[in-house]
Image: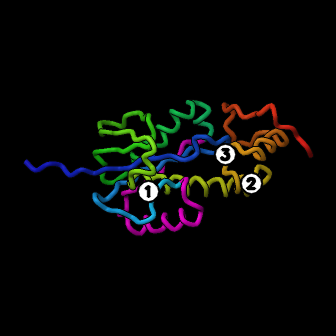
Amino acid sequence: MESKQLLTAGVDEAGRGCLAGPVVASAVIWPEGFKLKGLTDSKKLNHNTRASLRKRLEEILPKGSWAIGVSSSEEIDKVNILQATFLAMHRAIDQLLPQPNMLLIDGNRFKPYLNITHRCEIKGDARFQAISAASIFAKTYRDQIMLEAHLENPQYKWNANKGYPSRNHRIAMLKYGLSEIHRKSFKWQNPQIKLDF
């Protein structure tokens, strides 16, 4: 009997530690044995390099072999950030064609998806190109969401901080209050922050 071909998908997320915006996940079926020069953890790359790699990945990977899943700030507040991250990951995996039979998950926790075998890999985004590719898609997609959100709410400087808890972002939250896409369940106030305006 012929053995079933191994289809491995890397899965990663972007935006778990943010104070605003969604958490975004990506799942990527990676060609066995393929190596893409320069592909590594998206956090180690600058904006231009990430954009260039994403374009290259879109050219190389067959249609249906990568996907994006999103969980909104409202969902994060409702179910908590960990469960919302799993939800975004599952939404990305849902869209893959064909469905993989092995999932490589960046990090140390995952909620099993149907009957697909998975393996959690700490710092996997720097060690497995399947996960690196997922990190590129998730990061660039989420950054675009926050750039668009910045046009509606420029006072929070999301074009620079992408929703992460920078000092200036938190000062803007104190000054202007919370926007519709801020995560209301997150603790963000730093008692050392003093307003000076």
Residue 193: % across, % down: 82, 37
Marked residue nearer the N-terminal end (3 or 1): 1
What amino acid is found at the position of numbered circle 2 in the picture?
A: Glu
Q: Name the residue under label 2.
A: 152
Residue pictured at 30% horizontal, 44% vertical: 102
Marked residue nearer the N-terminal end (2 or 1): 1
Kind of element beneath mark 2? helix
Mark 3 Cα within 10 Å, few/some/many (few <14, many 20+)? some
Marked residue nearer the N-terminal end (3 or 2): 2
Look at the image and give the residue range highlighted in magenta.
Answer: 43-72
Q: Is residue 39 left or right of residue 98?
A: right
Residue pictured at 44% horizontal, 40% vertical: 122
Residue pictured at 69% horizontal, 40% vertical: 182
Q: Name the residue under label 1.
A: 133
Residue 130: % across, % down: 38, 53
Q: Is 53 inside the magenta-drawn segment?
A: yes
- Vertical relation: 190 (above or below) 101: above
Kind of element beneath mark 3? loop
Whole-angstrom CA distance, mark 2 to mark 1, is: 30 Å
Whole-angstrom CA distance, mark 3 to mark 1, is: 22 Å
Mark 1 Cα within 10 Å, few/some/many (few <14, many 20+)? many
Mark 2 Cα within 10 Å, few/some/many (few <14, many 20+)? few
Whole-angstrom CA distance, mark 3 to mark 2, is: 17 Å
Front: mark 2 or 1: 1
Q: Name the residue under label 3.
A: 164
- Vertical relation: 179 (above or below) 135: above
Q: Is residue 143 left or right of residue 36?
A: right
Q: Which mark is residue 161?
A: none
Q: In this view, does 17 lie to the left or right of 151?
A: left
